[in-house]
C-alpha cells in the first residue's frame, strides 16, 4: 500500500530526552539502593512510566506496594519535568525538520505517536506544538507500546489505513508496536540497529524520504 502518513515517535526520534529520563530514574534508583545503569536504561525506552518503574524494581531487594510505586513514579516525573525545562528548539535531532518539510511537500499526513504523557510539554518546549496533523500519547490509550494502540489511534485520527502508515522509532518496544499495528517501520539509532538493518539509519539526517 502506498505511504500516506508518517508517524514519528517523540523521545529518541524528534528529540533526545532519554538522558533526562535516565538522570531522573537514576536518582530514584540510587536513593532506593536499586542497581541501575545506562544498559538497564535501554530497557525503559518507549515503555510507559509505570512499566519502566516495574522494570527498574525487578532488581530491588524488597517488594514495593502499589502506593509506594505510585509515589516513586510521581517523584521521577517531577525530577524529569524539572530537567525538561532545559530543552529548547536547538535540541531537535538532525534531519527531523527536513523530514517533516519533505513529508508535507509530498502531501503526506504527519503525526506523533509517543508513550510519553509529557508529549505536549515537550512539543511546546521545542516549538513544534502546531506542526503535526495528529498527536497521540500515552495519556490517550490504556495499553502503551509495545501494544499497537498508540499507532492505531494515530492512523484513525489521521483518517489513513494502518497499512499506509510509516512509523519512525528508536526503541525495540516501538518497532514491535508498529509491526503489531501492521505498519511499515524505519528504525533510527543504535538500539534498533539489529531489528531490521535494511530499514534503519543512525539519525533521520542519514535517511532519505
Ligand atoms: P513519560 P516515546 C517514551 O517516549 C520514552 O521513550 C520512555 O523512556 C518513557 O518512559 C515513556 O515515553 C513515558 O514517558 O514518563 O514522560 O510519560 O519514545 O514513546 O516518545
Ligand atoms: Mg522513543
Image (tube, helix red, strand yellow):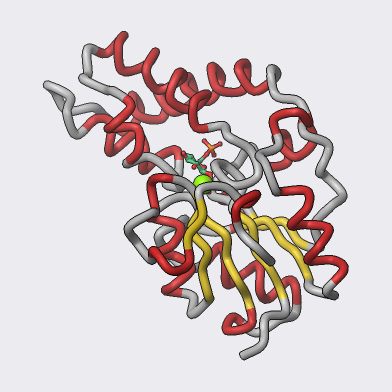
- Horizontal relation, residue 11 to residue 179: left or right: right
Count of all numbered marks drawn on residues in the image? 0
Residue drawn where x is 66% and y is 74% of the image? 155
Q: Quadrant of residue 118?
A: top right
Residue 40 location, x and y as percent? 28, 32
Residue drawn where x is 68% and y is 67% of the image? 6
Is the N terminus in the top left, top right, bottom left or bottom right quadrant? Answer: bottom right
Question: Residue 180, relative to residue 99: is it above or below?
Answer: below
- Horizontal relation, residue 40 to residue 190: left or right: left
Q: Quadrant of residue 208?
A: bottom right
- Horizontal relation, residue 67 to residue 73: left or right: left
Could you say which is closer to the camera, residue 67 or residue 89?
89
- Horizontal relation, residue 148 to residue 107: left or right: left
Question: Residue 182, relative to residue 75: is it above or below?
Answer: below
Q: Quadrant of residue 29?
A: top left
Q: Residue furthest left?
A: 61
Q: Residue furthest bottom?
A: 1
Residue 196 location, x and y as percent? 38, 66
Could you say which is closer to the camera, residue 18 or residue 156?
18
Residue drawn where x is 45% and y is 18% of the image? 23
Residue 63 location, x and y as percent? 17, 28
Residue drawn where x is 55% and y is 22% of the image? 80
Question: Residue 74, relative to residue 150: is it above or below?
Answer: above
Is the C terminus in the top left, top right, bottom left or bottom right quadrant? Answer: bottom right
Amino acid at each position: 500500500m502506498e505511504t500516506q502518513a508518517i508517524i514519528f515517535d517523540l523521545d529518541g526520534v524528534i528529540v533526545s530526552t532519554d538522558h533526562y529520563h535516565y538522570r531522573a530514574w537514576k536518582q530514584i534508583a540510587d536513593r532506593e539502593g536499586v542497581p541501575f545503569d545506562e544498559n538497564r536504561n535501554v530497557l525503559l525506552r518507549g515503555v510507559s512510566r509505570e512499566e519502566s518503574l516495574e522494570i527498574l524494581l525487578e532488581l530491588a531487594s524488597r517488594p514495593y506496594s502499589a502506593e509506594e510505586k505510585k509515589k516513586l513514579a510521581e517523584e521521577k516525573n517531577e525530577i524529569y519535568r524539572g530537567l525538561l525545562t532545559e530543552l529548547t528548539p536547538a535540541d531537535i535531532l538532525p534531519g527531523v525538520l527536513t523530514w517533516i518539510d519533505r513529508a508535507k511537500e509530498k502531501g503526506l499526513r504527519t503525526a506523533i505517536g509517543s508513550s510519553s504523557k509529557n508529549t505536549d510539554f515537550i512539543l511546546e518546549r521545542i516549538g513544534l506544538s502546531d506542526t503535526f496533523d495528529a498527536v497521540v500519547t500515552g495519556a490517550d490509550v490504556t495499553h502503551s507500546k509495545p501494544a499497537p494502540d498508540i499507532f492505531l489511534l494515530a492512523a484513525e485520527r489521521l483518517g489513513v489505513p494502518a497499512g499506509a502508515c510509516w512509523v519512525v522509532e528508536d526503541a525495540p518496544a516501538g518497532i514491535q508496536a508498529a509491526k503489531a499495528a501492521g505498519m511499515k517501520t524505519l528504525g533510527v539509532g543504535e538500539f534498533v540497529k539489529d531489528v531490521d538493518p535494511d530499514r534503519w539509519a543512525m539519525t533521520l539526517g542519514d535517511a532519505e524520504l
